[in-house]
Image (spheres, rainbow, N blue to C red):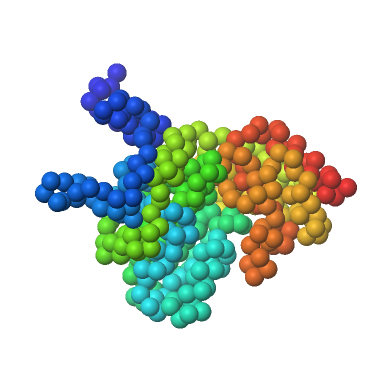
Amino acid sequence: MTKASNHKQSIETRLAQALHFVEPESGAVIPSIQPTATYARDENYEPRKPYWYRRDGSETTAHAEAIIAELENARESLLFSSGMSACNAVIEHLPNGAHVVVPKVMYHGVLQQIQNYENKNRLIVSSYTAGNLDEMKAAIRNQDTQLVWVETPNNPNWEVTDIAASAEIAHAAGAKLMVDCTGTPPCMTRALDLGADFSFHSATKYLNGHSDVTAGVLSVNHTSQSWEEIIMIRKLQGTVLNSFDAWLLIRGMRTLFLRVEKSCKNAMAIARHFENHDHIETLLYPGLPSDPGHEIAKRQTDGQFGGMMSLIVKGTTQNAIDVARYCEVFYPATSLGGVESLIEHRKTVSGEGFPVHPRLLRLSVGIEDADDLIYDLEQALVRAFG
């Protein structure tokens, strides 16, 4: 038997116990919520902790950040009140006229904000097709591009981008790499270990996992002037995650590995069942060997592939909408990463200006019984095409 002194606890154990939390006074194994908006200084009129007002943070939020930093293998993590506020902080910290390179299709809220900044001449934007490293490299301006943005797998078509190769390309040109891996949380993909400068997750999704919190998190391996500017933006804009939501996030993260494992298994079962279905034109899921991003996804996600997929149904746009309408187990709702399965007609949600196939249905596969989910999609397809 290996000596206890040589044994390193797994991240699964550390996460399940919220970093082995024990409240020193009572012995409670569940963290308490610290809701205060202000903090009294000590007898020497010095701050007792690194915050003096709620916009600086709280013990509860700091605990959640410490858990995520360990998950991400990061030096620091910073929680925001939403995923968009975290992304906005990264965009906002860029100097006027900065050149950024982004995917042509990505999460529509971030894409809209980047386009808003471009229209106001705050940013110069070049685009590439997600997963296409040749296009990415061609879009980058050597020693001029400040930031390269990668979303992988890419929402809602689930193209896979090689993070390590993207980091090499960006860094060779003097740019930083921002990676959004919301679809594959850090129990699957650790973007910082693969060379990213900023790792982002919408913590609303898999990290929380219960559809009752909105939150975003940025993580870094190296602090810098850019990081300090992002911290200040969060403070001045007041977008720090509040204590109650941080507590809910801690609660959700304790079951992250279990939830994600079940979600991935369910998604794979659904993908295999519907891959060559009579009513489905294309099934988009990196877990299938036929998917062009399969091998890269396999390397980057430790072979789990995630719980997100999209179906492009045959027929008309109305057929696609009807499938979502007729589901009885899948909720017709927007979001992802919760314990419950969701289905949405993406064009309806993202709007006419967003480049998405009009018959695409996005699925977030939860932890229900896989046979129930497969049956539900089958009956919805029969009714929609009946």
Query: How many numbered discs, if any?
Result: 0
Residue at left offset 32%, top offset 31%: 21
Q: Is 369 placed above or below 164 here?
A: above
In the displayed orientation, state which residue is furthest to the bottom: 121
Residue at left offset 52%, top offset 73%: 115
Q: Residue 246's image quarter?
A: top left
Residue at left offset 48%, top offset 42%: 208
Residue 239: percent from left, percent from top: 40, 57
As drawn, is 94 to the left or to the right of 130? Answer: left
Q: Quadrant of the N terminus?
A: top left
Nearer to us in this view, 23 or 75: 23
Q: Is 150 placed above or below 378 here?
A: below
Question: Does residue 221 appear in the picture of this structure?
Answer: no
In the displayed orientation, state which residue is furthest to the top: 1
Nearer to us in this view, 352 or 263: 352
As drawn, is 220 to the left or to the right of 158? Answer: left
Q: Is 138 placed above or below 220 here?
A: below
In the displayed orientation, state which residue is furthest to the left: 44
Residue 234: percent from left, percent from top: 36, 60
As drawn, is 127 to the left or to the right of 272? Answer: left
Residue 39: percent from left, percent from top: 26, 48
Q: Is 337 placed above or below 313 here?
A: above
Residue 192: percent from left, percent from top: 37, 52
Residue at left offset 44%, top offset 64%: 88
Question: Does residue 207 appear in the picture of this structure?
Answer: yes
Nearer to us in this view, 62 or 179: 62
